[in-house]
Image (cartoon, rainbow, N blue to C red):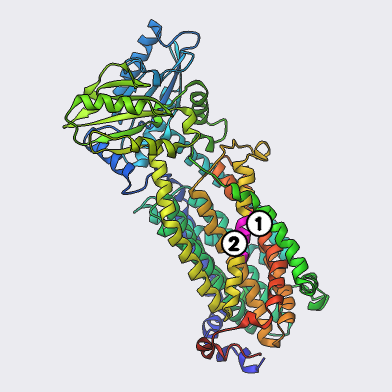
Amino acid sequence: MPQQDLDPTSHPDNGFAAWLVRRRILVVSLAGVLAVLLLVVAAGALGALSLSRIAAPGSESDRARQILADQFHTGPPNLVLLVDAGDRSVDDTAVRRAAAGLEQELTTQTGVAEVGSYWSRGDSPALRSRDGRQALVLVRVPGEVNESRARVGELADRYAGQRGPLHVQVGGQDEVFREIGAQARADFVQAEIIVLPLVLGLLMLIYRRIALALITLGIGVLATAGALAGLRLIASVTEVSTFAANLALVMGLALGVDYCLFVIARYREELADGNDVGRSVVIAVRTAGRTVLFSGLAVATSLLALLLFPLSFLRSFGYAGVLVVASALFGSLVVLPAGLALLGHRAAGPVREQPVEHGRWFRLAQVVMRRPLLIGGAVLALVLLLASPALGLRFGLPDARILPAEASSRITADQIRAGFGQEESDALYVVATRADAAGPLAQYAGQLSRLDGVAQVDSAAGGFVDGQRIVPPASDRFSRDGGTYLTVTPTQAVLEGDVATLVDRIRAVPAPYDVVIGGSPAEMLDWRDALADRIPLVLGVILLLSFAVLHLATGSVLLPLKATVLNLLSLGVMFGVTVWVFQQGNLSGLLGFTPTGGLEASMPMLMFCIVYGLSMDYEVFVVSRIREEYLRTGDSALAVATGLQRSAPLVSAAAVVLASSFAVYATGGVVYLKMIGIGMAVAVLVDATLIRGVLLPAFMKLAGRANWWLPSFGAAGLRVSRQPR
């Protein structure tokens, strides 16, 4: 390498790095002050985040909810009281009297807009259990999501328990999501307690220097604090999911550790080569820092694509991802170089005991490249086998089984599922803003009640089961301002099966008026459709931008295409494991969750974006070092083996830290977090070993010099950078 390339003053990037070295005390001091400020702001982040209601803005179900609220002053209940009469029937006189008192008391509570029950709705069969000993009270608490859920929680605490001859349990959609949010926050605190000492211990094993372990962990904490502080500010203007904090913790630590590992490793290399501290810092920033920057862009690109979804739940992770990457880059490219300059030779690594060509990754690469088709083909077959369960991926709707079995709203939901043939709290709403004739309404309600999967239809013309009126008319409840609505109560079987088919059947029945369909099942389906509509755009943006980032990092056309294929293999393994465990229920006893036979649609998309970004992260680290060796030697096979030996130990170490951090969430209570933790821990480990350690060198050996091919129209601009050094 020409001497001027090592001169800090001869490289455009060296000015800033050299300034960091000169002002190291100032930089580290200001970083400490910034960290304290960020931690103070981040401390209130968990209280500012929430779980928004499942809704697709502008969808048919969203319009139905709005019409119900504006014209009819009603809507789906968000608090359900399961009333158990013990040994008595719910029709017992004393039970009726106590239930009437309970209902009357509920109507007087602040925030309660509507109360209905088996007893006040004409002994509706939809609200009575099969054995006649339990019945439901449905409560609607309107308002902004955080405010209404807080009030739902207060009411749940007040009314749960024994009330005369009645035993009351609480549940309902908002109570379920309130408990999910509380559990996610508890899981965050538990993960923080476990992850921080775990990561510190792993860093001690990697560095064998307490100072380096502490500064790396500190930058991971800085990245997490920066993301949480940013999320708190964003939450003041828009909804941000509680789960975004969990992602910020894991990704903040993971990326902080990743980026520090590479910068520190290069700094140690330069010290070992005889450079002084200042020059070693500058070279580390110029080489490893460049790689870290491109890696950050690759990860941010994948997570930024989540902002293209019109769903606040997924957008929340987009905010968290971008904030985490920005904070981690600041820590590793600004704070860390100043810290290394302060530590000086105290950060030096152990003396190299063997040349590069004796390293295990170098030897592995050579073995693979001697028989790339045989070894690569065998590993590819193994990866495809691990991915094969993904072919049975089935999407389902979320319910209370997201929570651990001991959660109060989960217990209530399980009892309703076991004791009731239907669930009116999950009814579909058929809404007509104009409806003039009573006759067509009765006929229409009767037709709807005959559909497979419909337990009961209630309307102004009465309640209908199998086409027969079984509850008298209630026009005062269902009609207002010239309009009307009907509630279609599905059976438990269809709620756990194919709800989409039921919604399609309802929409296919000719209505006497213009109607829109709403209610919880329709909202979940519209959510899923809104997600599906944006998936092509999101995938296109991710693939295009990640290709561009990797092309800029490598100066190659083929390598970004290869990276895409290898990343998809990692994703296939992740989805295969996720389906095998969380959809099919394998290991459910060990992991402590209840399988439902399907996956909520947004989770695979979220996991895709995160894992694709992390796979690109590792790809940039490995291929950038291979490229550096290729430019130095011009020997493609030697560059692959040497580059892998220089980068793979760091990638595998980073993967262990990241996988361990993700796996901690397997101990949590929310199934979503278990799914993210297990799925992504497996994907990261497979990506860092089988994918990067075997399939990458096999592919690059087969491609040869074509790895670095660039069309003639683009070669001129990169000719200087592609000359061997």
Residue that appears at 65% across and 52% down: 388
Q: Label 1 vs label 2: CA separation?
A: 28 Å
In the rendered image, which quarter is residue 221 located in?
bottom right
The secondary element bearing badge 1 is classed as helix
Residue 249 in the figure: left or right of residue 64: right
What stretch of residues is rendered in magenta?
566-573
Q: Is residue 328 visible?
A: yes
Question: Residue farthest to the top?
Answer: 93
Amino acid at the residue labelled 2 = Leu
In the image, residue 80 lies at what x, y percent?
41, 27
The secondary element bearing badge 2 is classed as helix
Amino acid at the residue labelled 1 = Val
Residue that appears at 56% across and 37% down: 596
Q: Is residue 49 visible?
A: no
Residue that appears at 56% across and 41% down: 671
Residue 241 in the figure: left or right of residue 272: left
Badge 2, how many Cα within 10 Å: few under 14, some, many 20+?
some
Taking 506 as reference, is 326 above or below it?
Answer: below
Taking 431 as reference, is 336 above or below it?
Answer: below
Is residue 650 a member of the stretch shown in magenta?
Answer: no
Taking 720 as reference, is 323 above or below it?
Answer: above
Q: Which quarter of the figure is the N terminus placed in?
A: bottom right
In the image, residue 81 lies at what x, y percent?
42, 23
Residue 403 in the figure: left or right of residue 368: left
Badge 1, how many Cα within 10 Å: few under 14, some, many 20+?
many
Give the residue at mark 1. Answer: 199
Give the residue at mark 2. Answer: 568
Counting residues from the start of the chain, the first of labels 1 and 2 encountered is: 1
